[in-house]
Amino acid sequence: MSIVNTDLDGVLPLIAKGKVRDIYAVDENNLLFVATDRISAYDVIMTNGIPDKGKILTQLSVFWFDFLAPYIKNHLVASNDKEVFALLPSKLSEEKYKSQLEGRSLIVKKHRLIPLEAIVRGYITGSAWKEYKNSKTVHGVKVENEDLQESDAFPTPIFTPSTKAEQGEHDENISIEQAAEIVGKDICEKVAVKAVELYSAAKNLALSKGIIIADTKFEFGLDENNELVLVDEVLTPDSSRFWNQKTYQVGKSQESYDKQFLRDWLTANGLNGKEGVAMAPEIAVKSKEKYIEAYEAITGRKWA
């Protein structure tokens, strides 16, 4: 069974509903993040979910938050069920609520969010490859190497920000100069340096496990001292492109540990971009297998 929506009967106020997460206010300083099993493709959320997807994403995020803790503070207050339920109203320990929250919930501290998607690209693929083919630029910036092939590694990882759009709208790729206009030059520079540092550390770990992180998206907030804090999810198949190192070949697109099964199925059936679509059961199963494969490879832990 998958959890595509949560309903806490008003025990905590629901303050936001994203493509994957339901966010509740715990108190004036803390939020409850619940990762559902919802999945979207082409900016449309499917009517059915991928069983345990939210749990897998949550546990993978916790792994990366822990790994990156020496590099940056994060927003976690409670990251396992025992800690989470200890900080929630006792009513939420009742089975009808517990079954919605177990394994997929985090309590996080509120921070002032920086309104940027901090995208770091280590390899050229996707929209970056399309732009490079046309103009030898990525996000409007000239790329030093003019002989890159699809899926090639950049000489050094590059920071390519985008706007942070409201749900239902598209994030827009922007230049670093445009990002600086939005958040200020100082914060933009700090975000750029930190995002590349975090990506590089994660990329090296993943490579040692046979996984290539082609690109990823970080989100940051600011604490009371205006210091960067890592927020949202981190380095999951929903926010990153993971490739299998064994099958990696320059000069073509790569299979990803993400929504590719779903995207291909939607396209083949003429359903991409259409509302109210339920994915076929076999697509949900294959997608779950990919999420588990990525989790087990990176963490070295067996998914129970």
Image: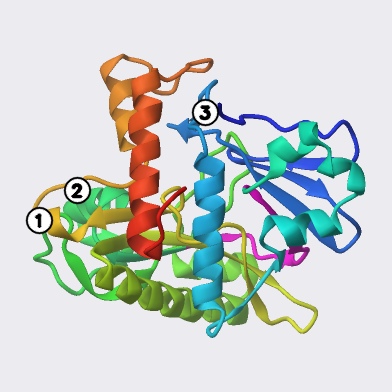
113 in the magenta segment:
yes
Distance CA(mark 2)–CA(mark 3): 25 Å
Q: Which residue is mark 2?
A: 254
The answer, for residue 107, to whether it is visible in the render is no
Q: How is the image coloured?
A: rainbow
Q: Secondary structure at mark 1?
A: loop
What amino acid is at disc 3? Gly
The first of marks 2 and 3 along the sequence is 3
- Is disc 3 surrounded by few (<14), some (14 to 19) or many (20+) residues within 10 Å? many
Q: Position of residue 202 (x, y in %)?
A: 39, 72
Q: Main secondary structure of the magenta part?
A: strand
Labelled disc at residue 269: none
Q: Which residue is mark 3?
A: 49
- Of badges 1 and 3, the one in the foreground is 3
The first of marks 1 and 3 along the sequence is 3
Q: Which residue is mark 1?
A: 249
> Which quarter of the rendered picture does the N terminus lie within?
top right
- Is disc 1 surrounded by few (<14), some (14 to 19) or many (20+) residues within 10 Å? few
Depth check, front residue: 51 or 174: 51
The first of marks 1 and 2 along the sequence is 1
Q: Are marks 1 and 2 in contact (CB under 8 Å)?
A: yes
What amino acid is at disc 1? Gln
Span of residues in magenta: 104-118
Q: Secondary structure at mark 2?
A: loop
The answer, for residue 270, to whether it is visible in the render is yes
Distance CA(mark 1)–CA(mark 2): 7 Å
Q: Is residue 135 left or right of residue 139?
A: left
